[in-house]
Image (cartoon, rainbow, N blue to C red):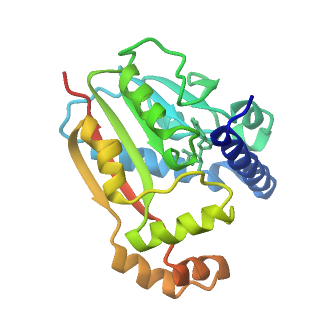
Amino acid sequence: MQDDKEKRWLIAQEHEKKYWVKASNKIENTDRDLSYYKDRCEQIKNSFHGLGVNWAEVRILEIGSGPLGVVNYMDGDCYALDPLMDSYNNQKKLIANRRRSVTYLQGKGEMLPFEGSFFKIVFMINVLDHCMDPKKTVDETYRVLASNGYLYLVVNVRSKYGFFMRNIMEYFRLDKGHPHSYTKNIVDSEVRRNFETISSHLEDFKEKKRRISRNTVWREYLKYILGVNGYRYTLLLEKMG
Ligand SMILES: C[S@@+](CC[C@H](N)C(=O)[O-])C[C@H]1O[C@@H](n2cnc3c(N)ncnc32)[C@H](O)[C@@H]1O
């Protein structure tokens, strides 16, 4: 029997699936339209600078990769896992640029099909607030990471006021795609405290507010008025011991 958590998650996943079908229909040139994965890959590699990672040798998992994931542009032994992978696999434009050597798997972060300590690096980018059970996903991530392995996490967080407003919206299911919402403090206490922090970066609230206040897309502007915009929180964490 489905519990409430699962039902809510399935609504979000249906929404996500539709988003990608729509995105796929709009794609004219896969290389250009999904190039942000490639750009992100370079940014991520830069943030590991000085840690002595040998990218050609390392084993990497991306949880909630979407159709391609940044691992598609990494060397090494790469795995990408997503609960919508079977659906992505059926959309030719979304997967046209896949690298053959990446292992793409259907699965959930809450139940990773790997033995403990299997990966040196795990990426989780814009996924935590989409999960059915984020805490379980973090526990699983911890389990599959080798000691002194790294978690690269990106999650949208809100101000305390934005978090409060977002919870009201959640009551009315106004943001179907995200079953969960975070403040920086919640991420710190639920995720960060289990690891050693190598680096952390929070998008500038004021600067982003200024930018969004000029946004002409009504949906973004409405989010600004309600104060529910998300700010990117990027963490590079190390599993100690
Ligand atoms: C906003 S997309 C992000 C995709 C990609 N990481 C990116 O940044 O483009 C969120 C992804 O998380 C996946 N997801 C949702 N619940 C998940 C779970 N429990 N475990 C792993 N991935 C999940 C969704 O299927 C979706 O592909």
In the displayed structure, would residue 29 be above or below residue 99? Answer: below
Q: Is residue 149 left or right of residue 173?
A: left
What residue is at 26 percent from the left and 52 percent from the top? Answer: 200
Q: Quadrant of the N terminus?
A: top right
Q: Nearer the viewer, residue 115 or 31?
A: 115
Tell me where residue 47 appears, x and y as whole percent: 28, 46
- Of 207 and 91, nearer the camera is 207
- Residue 120 lies, with reference to residue 64, above or below; the image says above
Does any portion of residue 52 appear in the rendered image? yes
Residue 96 makes an appearance in the image? no
The relative height of residue 25 versus residue 114 in the rendered view (above or below) is below
- The spot of residue 74 in percent (x, y) is 45, 33
Q: Position of residue 227 (x, y in %)?
A: 49, 77
**In the figure, is residue 54 to the left or right of 153?**
left
Measured as percent of width and height from the top left, residue 199 is found at 23, 48
Q: Residue at x 73, y 50 (%)?
A: 20
Q: How many marks?
A: 0
Which quadrant: the C terminus?
A: top left
- The outermost residue toward the top is 115
Horizontal side of 58 relative to 115 (left or right) equals left
Tell me what residue is drawn at x 55 percent, y 29 percent.
80
Quadrant of ligand 1 in image: top right
Q: Is residue 171 above or below residue 223?
A: above
Residue closest to the eye, 141 or 123:
141
